[in-house]
Image: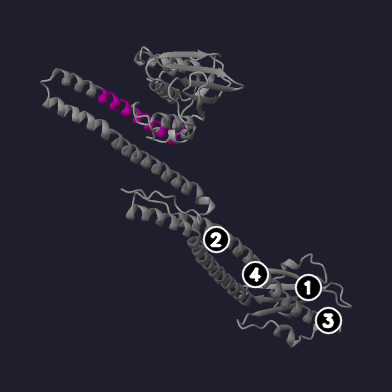
């Protein structure tokens, strides 16, 4: 069963509309209280007007309270809903006029001249009452005037206003929902465009690893979009690395393989001649050795390129111990007539570096120096401290490199012209350049003032690490 995917659009809309609905509820509650208060106060004013119109007509005749009931007093309370209106004028001696059973319990303790309002029930109907106690000349106790009205008009007006408020809120919520939907659609358009870019790559050409266009991507989506571009860049670099390695390998292996096949074929046809057989076997051995060296260098170059994609892991090490280990690894294969000198003037030389790659870098420089120094040649390797920098020089007594070629020799498969007598693939210094850049080590070429050949100078920043580093830690395998 496929998991249910959350919709970003739905989540954004819910997050937008939930506060709107809560606000609408709050507005509705406030509107209800406001409308109820306005309706009550407006109708109470009409009750007060009717009440005062009757109270103004109170008089005393022959010692008795009388009232000239004005028509306008009750007429102002007439509504379309035909509310029932009740009134009462009561003196100390009893009712003067009106409905004698009108409930006046709230008038106990009321201040004279101040109208009092309350809700009550009369004859089975909910009514709103207004009453006032009025002093009349020659009457000892205040005369009470009361007017009551059923609540039909009030309730109808309140309900109508609440209905219109509800419709207005519903229309407002609907309008906000539509506008929010449109806004979210427009806001998510850059994400949809980004998705289409990715889908187009998947459908049309999966090898298209160009960076995505992020010019219209909003800030909130930049992190995943940038991560996708970073992934494309790593894939592009890895693909380019594989393509370049394949091209380099096929190009460089073709020649030694052709030589090996030619000598194998020659050995088959001329196997009866001992001298030719020995010569052919020697050529085969040299071809195989050259092919092995080429494969080793190609793999080293590929490993260095791969390390460039993922930053090299640095560990504390002593550069002097790394140099000694590199020389010890190669001492058996160095021609007996080649003289190698190693002078490490300061100990320790602490670095934080990838010891495997550092060994490959030094090993390639040492191999080049031995190879180009020739028979009876001389190689000198020095290492010292120079104001916070580890300084390593490797010099040889070979023919050297013209200054005009210094920039070219670091290119892959480039060989200095007029050097056909020295076999090689042109990968040694290119490996050095890649690894040096990865380990943040500077390289410089010049002529050796002592030996006359090439001098390679390496500079690496020393680390504050001063502890002992075992030689075993620098062993690449």
Disc 3 packing (10 Å; few <14; some 14–19; many ≥20):
few
Residue 123 horizontal side relative to residue 130, left or right: left
**Colour mapping used in the image:** one colour
Q: Is residue 23 visible?
A: yes
Residue 211, position as x, y percentages in the image: 44, 50
Q: What secondary structure is marked by label 4?
A: helix
- Look at the image and tell me in which quarter the C terminus lies: top left
Residue 183, position as x, y percentages in the image: 52, 63
Look at the picture and state if 320 lies above or below 225: above
Foreground residue among 57 and 238: 238
- Mark seen at residue 132: 1
Cβ–Cβ under 8 Å for marks 2 and 4: no
Q: What secondary structure is marked by label 2?
A: helix
Look at the picture and state if 397 lies above or below 84: above
- Mark seen at residue 64: 3
Give the magenta range.
286-311
């Amino acid at each position: 069963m496929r998991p249910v995917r959350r919709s970003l659009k739905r989540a954004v809309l819910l997050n937008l509309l939930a506060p709107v609905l809560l606000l609408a509820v709050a507005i509705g509650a406030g509107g209800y209280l406001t409308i109820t208060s306005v309706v009550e106060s407006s109708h109470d004013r009409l009750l007060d007007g009717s009440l005062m119109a009757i109270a103004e007509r109170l008089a005393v005749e022959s010692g008795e309270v009388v009232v000239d009931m004005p028509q306008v007093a009750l007429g102002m309370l007439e509504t379309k809903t035909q509310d029932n209106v009740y009134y009462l004028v009561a003196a100390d001696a009893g009712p003067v006029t009106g409905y004698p059973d009108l409930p006046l319990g709230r008038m106990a303790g009321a201040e004279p001249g101040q109208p009092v309002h309350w809700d009550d029930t009369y004859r089975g109907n909910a009514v709103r009452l207004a009453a006032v106690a009025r002093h009349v000349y020659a009457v000892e106790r205040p005369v009470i005037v009361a007017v009551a009205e059923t609540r039909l008009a009030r309730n109808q007006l309140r309900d109508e206003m609440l209905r219109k408020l509800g419709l207005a809120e519903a229309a407002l919520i609907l309008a906000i929902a539509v506008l929010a939907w449109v806004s979210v659609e427009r806001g998510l358009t850059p994400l949809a465009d980004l998705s289409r870019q990715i889908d187009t790559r998947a459908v049309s050409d999966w090898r298209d690893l160009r960076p995505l266009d992020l010019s219209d991507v909003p800030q909130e989506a930049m992190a995943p979009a940038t991560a996708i571009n970073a992934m494309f860049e790593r894939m592009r670099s890895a693909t380019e690395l594989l393509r370049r390695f394949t091209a380099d390998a096929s190009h460089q292996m073709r020649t030694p393989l052709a030589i090996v096949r030619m000598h194998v074929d020659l050995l088959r046809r001329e196997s009866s001649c001992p001298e030719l057989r020995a010569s052919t076997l020697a050529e085969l051995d040299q071809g195989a050795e050259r092919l092995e060296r080429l494969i080793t260098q190609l793999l080293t170059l590929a490993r260095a390129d791969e390390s460039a994609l993922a930053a090299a892991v640095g560990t504390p090490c002593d550069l002097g111990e790394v140099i000694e280990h590199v020389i010890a690894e190669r001492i058996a294969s160095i021609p007996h007539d080649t003289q190698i000198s190693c002078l490490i003037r300061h100990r320790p030389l602490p670095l934080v570096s990838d010891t495997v790659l550092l060994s490959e870098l030094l090993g390639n420089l040492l191999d080049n120096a031995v190879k180009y120094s020739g028979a009876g040649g001389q190689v000198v390797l020095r290492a010292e401290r120079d104001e916070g920098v580890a300084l390593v020089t490797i010099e040889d007594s070979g023919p050297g490199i013209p200054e005009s070629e210094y920039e070219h020799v670091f290119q892959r498969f480039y060989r200095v012209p007029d050097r056909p007598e020295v076999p090689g693939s042109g990968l040694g210094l290119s490996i050095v350049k890649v690894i040096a850049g990865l380990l943040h080590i500077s390289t410089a070429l010049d002529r050796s003032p002592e030996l006359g050949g090439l001098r390679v100078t390496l500079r690496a920043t020393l680390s504050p690490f001063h502890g002992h580093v075992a030689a075993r830690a620098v062993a690449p395998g």
